[in-house]
Amino acid sequence: MENQTQIFGIRAIIEAVNAGETIDKVFLQKGLKGELFGELESVLRKNSINSSYVPVEKLNRLTNKNHQGAVAQISPIAFHDMETLVLNVIESGKTPLFLLLDQLSDVRNFGAIIRTAECTGVDGIIIQKKGGAPVNGDTIKTSAGAVFKIPICKVDHIKDAVFYMQASGIKVIAATEKTNDTLYDVSFVEPCAIIMGSEGKGINPSTLKVVDAKAKLPLLGDIESLNVSVACGAFLYEVVRQRLS
C-alpha cells in the first residue's frame, strides 16, 4: 500500500500537483537548493499542500528509488467538499452527525476513529489540510476499510468547519476536560458535530472559544486522560444511546 501511495522525484511531484492529484504531504530534503526545487516549493505553497523538511536519511527510508530530495504521499481516497456534504445530509432529512478532528497526528488513532465513526452512523469526518495524520496504508488497515465508506473532508482550519456547521444549524460540541459538564449532561439529539483534539495538545484554545458546548468523560481512576480513539468511541456511542432512546 505504501508504494502505491507515493510519488518520488521533484518533477514528478510538480506534475502530480498540477494534474490535481490528491496529495497528503510532501517530504523535502533539508538544505536542498536549485531552480527546480524552488519551483516545487512554490507549487506546494500555492496549492496549500502540507510539507516538511527532513534529513535525506528519512527520504531514503521512505523509498530506495532516486527521490531527488522529494517524496510525496498520495491519498488513496478522494476527499469530499464539506459544504456540499453538509447540505446533502441536511436535505436528506436525517439528523446530522459530524466529527471534526483537530490535528490528530497518529494514523492508527485516525483509522480507529474512522472505523467507529462508520459504525455509529457519522455522516462525515472533517480534518485540517495541514498538521494532521494522513490517510495511508496504516490508516486503511486500522479502519478495517471504513475509510472507503465514510466521507472525509479537508478544510484550511477546523474553525472554518465550526463556523459553517453553526451557520447550518448544527451544534458544535467540544470533547475536552476543560469543562464541568460530562457528556451525559449534554444533548446530542439535535444536529451536532463533535470535535476531538490532538493526542498531545487537545483542541486548539481559539477553537474552544467558539464552540456551542463542551463535554468531558468522567475519569474515576488516577490516569487523567483516555486514548483519543477510545474517548471518541465513548462520545459517539452516547450519541447513539440518546438518539435511540
Image (cartoon, helix red, strand yellow):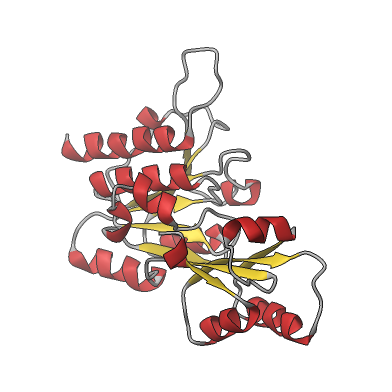
| Residue 189 quadrant | top left
Residue sitting at x 51%, y 66%: 155
Residue sitting at x 23%, y 34%: 241
Q: Is residue 38 left or right of residue 150?
A: right
Q: Is residue 21 left or right of residue 37?
A: left
| Residue 230 quadrant | top left
Is residue 4 visible in the rendered structure shown here? Answer: yes
Q: For the N terminus, give its image quadrant.
A: bottom left
Residue sitting at x 70%, y 70%: 69
Measured along the vertical axis of the image, is residue 136 above or below residue 39? above
Q: For the C terminus, give its image quadrant.
A: top left
Residue sitting at x 26%, y 58%: 149
Measured along the vertical axis of the image, is residue 102 above or below residue 224? below
Report x, y in % for residue 190: 29, 48
Report x, y in % for residue 68: 68, 74
* Badge count: 0
Q: Nearer the viewer, residue 196 or 107?
A: 107
Q: Nearer the viewer, residue 111 or 55?
A: 55
Report x, y in % for residue 153: 42, 65
Q: Nearer the viewer, residue 183 or 82?
A: 82
Report x, y in % for residue 85: 33, 68
Q: Is residue 148 left or right of residue 76?
A: left
Is residue 75 visible in the rendered structure shown here? Answer: no
